[in-house]
Structure formats: structure tokens, C-alpha cells
Image (cartoon, rainbow, N blue to C red):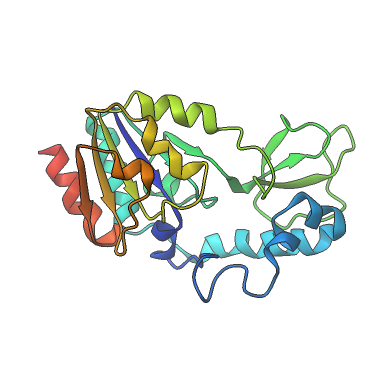
């Protein structure tokens, strides 16, 4: 099985701004104002407007060559993508087995029933409620919240023969720890123009570092795997 761990760098190549860059996603807002339970409690309108803008931006971008290359893997091998990204570019490229660690922009959920998650395409306002009357909120894992999909992600990595790490700084935990759950014999590819070898990666015996962007490197890497 092949598992891909993808991060913000993949989306950045499609034009989605990332909060870790100088011109990042959060530059006009304190991160805790728009990505924390405290920020939501303080000003729901601000948080909704912030994510409404991010959601609208998805209609202006499209998958890049890296997304399309990863989608090809599913044709030949059991393939799963574990992404830190909240956009839908992997799905739009054709990947079907995508696990979002940090939530999804095109979904919202009930504040009173976390299991009530629905697809959402337009703006979210304070007037939008679930059937039980609870306020709807962005389906995003904010700072200080648990990552519900983490256990599923660990199980996928632990069953992998090949792990491809791409577009992530490998500095944000718990996502950065996932590669450490791969079997010792698994082949690990780390694709990044400025690779940062964290503790988990440093322990890998079968590690190949590719100093390049996702869009530049993944088409060739996927072709080599497919043979």
C-alpha cells in the first residue's frame, strides 16, 4: 500500500496562500482570532467571513501536476492520501481515498452535535443552524482541538509499503510524527524544495530526499513507481 502525507506546499503551488509564508493566510489576522475555539467564542462573524473567503477561493484554483500525479497511483496500487490541507484539490484531481487531518473547507458541522457534518458551498452565517437548532461552524480542526482522524491516519501509515511525504515542513505535530509509524522496511520519499529532516525522518533507513516542489517532482516519481 502507498500512503501520501501532504501539506500546505502542495496547495501553494496551485495558488492557495499558506499561513507559514511571509505573505501567509493569516497575515491580516491573529491566528488565534480565526483558528481557535476562543476566537470563535469571541467573534463568530469574523471567523465565518475568514473561512467564507477561503472557501470562495477554491473556485479560483485548480489541481496542479503534483495532485494529478498522485491520483494516477490509485489506478495501479491501493493508495491513500493523508493531508493537512483543508482544500479539495486532491479530490478534484481524481483521488478518492483522502483523509483530511485538519478538516475541510467545503464542509460545516453542528456545534451541538459534532457528528452532524454537511457539505457547504456558499457563505456560512450566524443564522445557519443544524436541524436541532445548534449553530453551524466551519468543519476545521482549530488550534487546541483534538485531531479526530489521527488514529485512522496512524493505521494507514503503519500498513504502508511506500510513504511519500510532500509539501509539508515536518514541523507541525501531531502530523509530523506520522512517518514514524511506517514499518521499518518501508520506502520513504520526502519531496520538498527546502527539506527539513525531523527526528522521525532521521531514523528512516530507506529514505530518499528529493529537493524539489510537488508539481515538479511527483510526476516523475509516480512514473518510476508505476514502472
Q: Residue furthest right?
A: 133
| Image position, residue 39 (x, y; %) | 79, 57
| Image position, residue 26 (x, y; %) | 62, 68
Q: Is residue 39 left or right of residue 216?
A: right
Q: Is residue 78 above or below residue 88?
A: above
- Which quadrant does the C terminus fall into? top left
Q: Is residue 110 above or below residue 191?
A: above
Q: Is residue 7 left or right of residue 32?
A: left
| Image position, residue 221 (x, y; %) | 18, 48
| Image position, residue 147 (x, y; %) | 60, 37
Q: For residue 79, which quarter of the picture?
A: top left
Q: Is residue 93 left or right of residue 226?
A: right
Q: Is residue 152 above or below residue 49?
A: above
The residue closer to the viewer here, 207 or 94, is 207
- Which quadrant does the N terminus fall into? top left
Q: Is residue 46 left or right of residue 189?
A: right
* Residue 123 visible in the current orientation: yes
Q: For residue 30, which quarter of the picture?
A: bottom right
Q: Residue furthest left?
A: 227
Residue at point 42% right, 47% down?
90
Amino acid at each position: 500500500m502507498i500512503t501520501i502525507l501532504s501539506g500546505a506546499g502542495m496547495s501553494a503551488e496551485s495558488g492557495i496562500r499558506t499561513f507559514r509564508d511571509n505573505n501567509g493566510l493569516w497575515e491580516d489576522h491573529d491566528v488565534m482570532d480565526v483558528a481557535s475555539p476562543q476566537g470563535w467564542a469571541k467573534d463568530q462573524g469574523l471567523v465565518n467571513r475568514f473561512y467564507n473567503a477561503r472557501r470562495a477561493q477554491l473556485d479560483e484554483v485548480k489541481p496542479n501536476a503534483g495532485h494529478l500525479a498522485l491520483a494516477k497511483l490509485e489506478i495501479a496500487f491501493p493508495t491513500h492520501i493523508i493531508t493537512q490541507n483543508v482544500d479539495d484539490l486532491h479530490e478534484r484531481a481524481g483521488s478518492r481515498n483522502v483523509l483530511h487531518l485538519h478538516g475541510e473547507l467545503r464542509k460545516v458541522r453542528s456545534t451541538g452535535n459534532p457528528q452532524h457534518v454537511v457539505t457547504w458551498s456558499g457563505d456560512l452565517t450566524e443564522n445557519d443552524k443544524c436541524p436541532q437548532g445548534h449553530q453551524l461552524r466551519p468543519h476545521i480542526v482549530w488550534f487546541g482541538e483534538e485531531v479526530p482522524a489521527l488514529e485512522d491516519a496512524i493505521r494507514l501509515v503503519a500498513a504502508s509499503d511506500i510513504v511519500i511525504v510532500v509539501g509539508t515542513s515536518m514541523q507541525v505535530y501531531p502530523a509530523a510524527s506520522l512517518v514514524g509509524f511506517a514499518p521499518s522496511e518501508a520506502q520513504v520519499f520526502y519531496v520538498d524544495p527546502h527539506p527539513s529532516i525531523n527526528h522521525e525522518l532521521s531514523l528512516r533507513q530507506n529514505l530518499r530526499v528529493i529537493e524539489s516542489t510537488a508539481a515538479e517532482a511527483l510526476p516523475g516519481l509516480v512514473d518510476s513507481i508505476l514502472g
